[in-house]
Amino acid sequence: MSLKIAIGGKGGVGKTTVTSLLARCLAAGKKNKVIAIDADPVANLAAGLGIAEDDPITPIAELKDLIAERTGAEPGTMGGFFTLNPKVDDIPERFSREKDGVKLLVMGTVQKGGSGCICPESTILKALMNHLVLYRDDIVIMDMEAGVEHLGRATSSSVDALIIVVNPGARSRVAAERIRKLGTDIGIKNIVVLGNRVRNEDDEKLIQESLPDFEILGFVSEHEEIVKSDRIGTRPFQNADEIPEEIFKIAARLEEMNQQK
């Protein structure tokens, strides 16, 4: 299965938890190959996937020897001559950390699309993102920064869906509209909303009424297990079969997108 999903949302809405749970559901039973990309500068997807923090993951952007080898230029330099199409196809296997069928790649600081910055770090990160989205026959699920500005147009046009995570509340529309515009501007065609931390039908109705022109992918309830795990820094639902059925249903809807391509 080749499915490419980007997940965005303003800070604090729970997008990293949503990303980790969907990745685990998609990998459950080892039926799919899943690569989870932590592309948020405040990287904490590892904890959500249950990857131990006692062996810290070095972000790709900080692998200075690798970047110098592949681009021919020292990281931190600007201008000059270096390879714009570096070899990256071995990076997912060499520098990922795997847990329960999900391979995690931590990108580090990724240059924002259109910023005009050309440097060895941004070049290798862009090449790696292009490889993962355009050429890997895997499910790739990306935990993005609050927006999706750093995705390039060539990459974004091949993203199957941008999921905007929102919480119940009037401010959801402002954030969702901003992220939708960013996604639309770079060519993402399928942009949907996922309501998170929903307590009851009134919360669902509030999201639906505040975002009437958005497709709602689904709702994730407020779970005490998630609140508790977030507080102590562990992943919620240690076993995949403990993950609520509502999240597996959302994952199934994503799989349907692949069948409809």
Image (spheres, grey):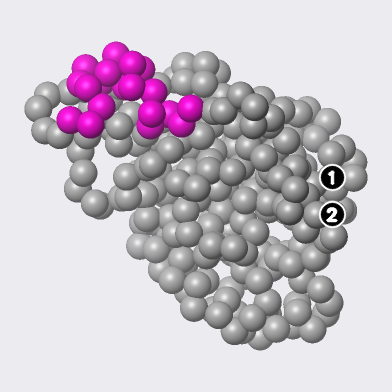
Q: Is residue 135 placed above or below 117 in the rendered structure?
A: above
Question: Left or right: where does residue 167 sit relative to residue 240?
Answer: left
User: Closest to the observer: 206 or 228?
Assistant: 228
Label 2's element? Answer: helix
User: Closest to the observer: 48 or 164?
Assistant: 48
- Whether residue 252 can be seen here: no
Q: Is residue 241 placed above or below 17 in the rendered structure?
A: above
Q: Which residue is at a point 27% across and 18% down the rendered structure image?
A: 68
Quarter occupied by residue 100: top right
Q: Marks 1 and 2, Cα distance to the nearest angstrom?
A: 7 Å
Q: Which residue is mark 1?
A: 237
Q: Position of residue 223 (x, y in %)?
A: 83, 61
Q: Which residue is mark 2?
A: 225
Callout 2: 10 Å neighbours few (<14), some, many (20+)? few
Quarter occupied by residue 188: bottom left
Magenta span: 58-77
Q: How many marks?
A: 2
Q: Amino acid at mark 2?
A: Glu
Question: Residue pushed farthest right?
Answer: 242
Q: Amino acid at mark 1?
A: Phe
CB under 8 Å between callouts 1 and 2?
yes
Q: Is residue 79 placed above or below 81 in the rendered structure?
A: below
Is 220 colored magenta in this rendering? no
Question: Left or right: where does residue 210 sit relative to residue 186?
Answer: right
Q: Is residue 10 placed above or below 48 in the rendered structure?
A: below
- Whether residue 179 can be seen here: yes
User: Closest to the observer: 87 or 225?
Assistant: 225
Q: Position of residue 26 (x, y in %)?
A: 73, 40
